[in-house]
Amino acid sequence: TQVDVEVATVISDADMLIRRGRLIEAQELLAGNYRRSPRQDGAIEELIVLAEDTRLRAYYETALSLEQDFRFEQAIVAYDELLLEAEGYFDDALTRRDTLADYVDKATRWYAAAEDARGTPEELAYLRRIDIVYPEYRDVVERIEALEAAEDAQFEALESLGAIDASNP
């Protein structure tokens, strides 16, 4: 029938829109033609699901990219937005979000402990812990580098005074 031909064209057009990333436009086109041709409703439903999954996948990829760039607080927000859109579940987004929140919490606590331990060996130990779970946290890398440089300078000074024999560990 003529309606079947029109719906087949809509399905083809919607598929192309999805491939081009024009997801909302595709979803609207499909929704407007659902139930016009019962024989093709299955194909329309599949494309609606594909468009939604593609849309959510874009959220996920954004969050994952932020995570991989060690921008954990922003990644947590992006995962939260994804989970809200996906009604609480999408791949491993919830696990990733919870892991990042744990890293941020640990980094925050350890940073406070490093502040309290300024000038002691514990300061460097806390900063190194943070560097393992969240290397981009605040000024951790710079502080570690400064403390390690100070340790090296102190060692070299003691070695030059003969207080330490570096050849005999």
Image (cartoon, helix red, strand yellow):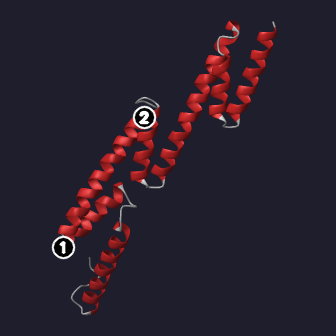
What residue would you read off at disc 1? 120
> Residue flagged by tag 2: what amino acid is it?
Leu
Seen from the viewer's position, the closer of residues 61 and 17 is 17
Taking the image as shown, residue 59 lies to the left or right of residue 166, namely right
In the rendered image, the quadrant that contains the C terminus is: bottom left
State the residue at coordinates (53%, 34%): 56
> Residue flagged by tag 1: what amino acid is it?
Thr
In the rendered image, the quadrant that contains the N terminus is: top right
State the residue at coordinates (51%, 49%): 65
Q: CA distance from mark 1 to mark 2?
A: 44 Å
Q: Earlier in the sequence, mark 1 or mark 2?
A: 2
Query: Quick one: label 1, few (<14), some, or many (20+) residues within 10 Å?
Result: few
State the residue at coordinates (75%, 23%): 12
Disc assigned to residue 84: 2
Which of discs 1 and 2 lies nearer the camera? The answer is: 2
Q: Position of residue 157 (x, y in %)?
A: 28, 89
State the residue at coordinates (25%, 65%): 125
